[in-house]
């Protein structure tokens, strides 16, 4: 569903005149130039205004974000039910305490996608250095993090997942979105740190970003984001090491 939504959004943008450059990673941004310069695979490109919204790679392009934002690798696992009807009637859920996890059953309630919280994610200061394909010991270590769900909550599940995927996400210390202009250039808007809920709020975030970059202000007040209290501390900005996040309790 997420991929379909992105494709539809991109197609709507094209119909309204947008140029979309697929498979064009940004390796560098020159925020002090006027206009702003961005390094693409084909060289430097120049723009009057820039919205930087590149998730877990934000801290690589804008290093000062490491004081406010950390990158994590999330692992999701899909399990079949071991007994027929074991998941019947189970709705999607998010359990915040005493141990954080979430589950999304398939439409036929024969399988379920499971995910864990911040404190169980893989830590790194570089999104390009995550092990993304889990095999052998790495896979076994991740699977052990899910065992308590199978044992305590959903004993109807099979012991081994039929699918495993990893994703890159970034988190602010307040667990709320980071929406601010770059301190060196007000023509660069940074939108990052969506803390695991970016896709759900993407329509309104897109509207806010559009208003800010075009008009310099938004109809929606986002000042509360900067005032929010932090839930954890960043101990090592380069490596992304933090204190535990009490909002997402450990298993």
Image (tube, rainbow, N blue to C red):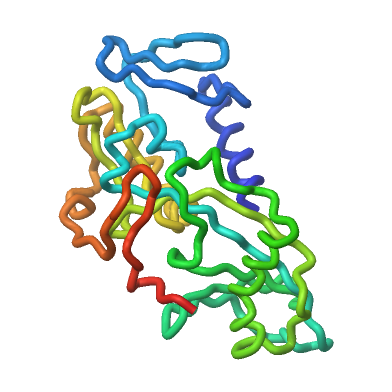
Residue 57 at what x, y percent from top left? 46, 38
Q: Is residue 139 above or below residue 217?
A: below
Relative to 43, is 170 on the left or the right? Answer: left
Furthest residue in direction front, as rendered: 137
- Residue located at (19% from left, 30% from top): 183
Residue 104 at what x, y percent from top left? 62, 71
Give the camera-side residue of 111 and 200: 111
Give the camera-side residue of 87 and 140: 140
Is there any visible trace of residue 232 in the rendered image? yes
Residue 62 at what x, y percent from top left? 34, 32
Q: Quadrant of residue 103?
A: bottom right
Q: Is residue 6 above or below residue 82?
A: above
Furthest residue in direction right, as rendered: 84
Residue 30 at what x, y percent from top left? 33, 17
Is there any visible trace of residue 108 in the rendered image? no
Q: Is residue 169 above or below residue 16?
A: below
- Residue located at (44% from left, 67% from top): 119
- Residue located at (30% from left, 40% from top): 65
């Amino acid at each position: 569903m997420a991929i379909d939504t992105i494709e539809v959004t991109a197609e709507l943008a094209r119909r309204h005149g947008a140029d979309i450059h697929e498979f064009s990673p940004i390796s560098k941004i020159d925020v002090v130039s006027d206009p702003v310069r961005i390094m693409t695979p084909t060289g430097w490109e120049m723009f009057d205004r820039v919205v930087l919204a590149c998730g877990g790679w934000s801290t690589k392009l804008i290093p000062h974000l490491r004081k406010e934002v950390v990158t994590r690798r999330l692992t999701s696992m899909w399990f079949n039910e071991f007994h027929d009807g074991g998941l019947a009637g189970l709705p999607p859920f998010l359990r915040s305490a005493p141990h954080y996890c979430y589950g999304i059953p398939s439409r036929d309630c024969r399988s379920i996608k499971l995910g864990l919280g911040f404190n169980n994610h893989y830590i790194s200061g570089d999104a390009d250095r995550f092990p993304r394909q889990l095999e052998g010991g790495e896979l076994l270590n991740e699977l052990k993090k899910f065992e308590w769900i199978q044992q305590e909550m959903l004993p109807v599940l099979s012991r081994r997942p039929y699918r495993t995927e990893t994703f890159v996400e970034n988190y602010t210390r307040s667990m709320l979105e980071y929406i601010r202009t770059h301190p060196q250039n007000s023509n660069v808007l940074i939108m990052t740190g969506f803390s695991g809920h970016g896709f759900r709020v993407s329509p309104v975030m897109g509207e806010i970003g559009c208003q800010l970059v075009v008009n310099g202000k938004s109809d929606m007040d986002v000042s509360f984001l900067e005032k929010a209290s932090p839930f954890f501390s960043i101990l090592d900005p380069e490596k992304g090491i933090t204190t535990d996040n009490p909002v997402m309790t450990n298993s």
